[in-house]
Amino acid sequence: MSAPQKLPNQLKPLFWFTDPERLDLNKNKVDIIHQVLALGSLEDIKLLFSLYPREEIRRVFLKTPRNIYTPKGFDFIKNFILKEKKPLSFNRYAKNILGPVARP
């Protein structure tokens, strides 16, 4: 059994709601990927791509949607970071504190 891989210090502020020292890069991969994509800076996202292969980040984003993205953030990650061409269910990713986000 290998030792847990710890979250880099640069990313810890993105996990204010939990103890970032307890996060493991393998066990908590889905949560880490989504949290960094949704709230991280471009430098944080660059670091994310050094921690996980591009295809793994893409797979997590597509197969395990999280309703934590702002509408603009979702569009940016989908279209510019991951360059995903197929349509995705916007409401599975985007949050709105007032209820579901209406989209034209």
Image (cartoon, rainbow, N blue to C red):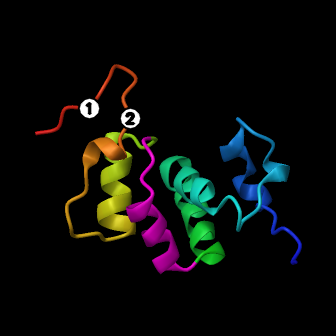
Give the side of residue 36 with respect to residue 26, left or right.
Answer: left
Q: Amino acid at mark 2?
A: Lys
Quarter of the rendering containing residue 64: bottom left
Quarter of the rendering containing residue 44: bottom right
Residue for point 79% across, 48% down? 20
Q: Position of residue 80 (x, y in %)?
A: 33, 65
> Among all residues in the image, which is located at the extreme front?
1
Q: Which structural element holds mark 1?
A: loop
Nearer-the-camera pick, 20 or 59: 59
Which residues lie in the magenta part? 53-67
Q: Amino acid at mark 1?
A: Val
Residue for point 34% across, 45% down? 92
Q: Position of residue 33 (x, y in %)?
A: 56, 60
The numbered mark, 2 or 1, whose residue comes first in the sequence reads: 2
Give the side of residue 85 with respect to residue 50, left or right.
Answer: left
The numbered mark at residue 95 is 2
Label 1 near label 2: C-beta < 8 Å?
yes
Residue for point 70% across, 55% down? 11
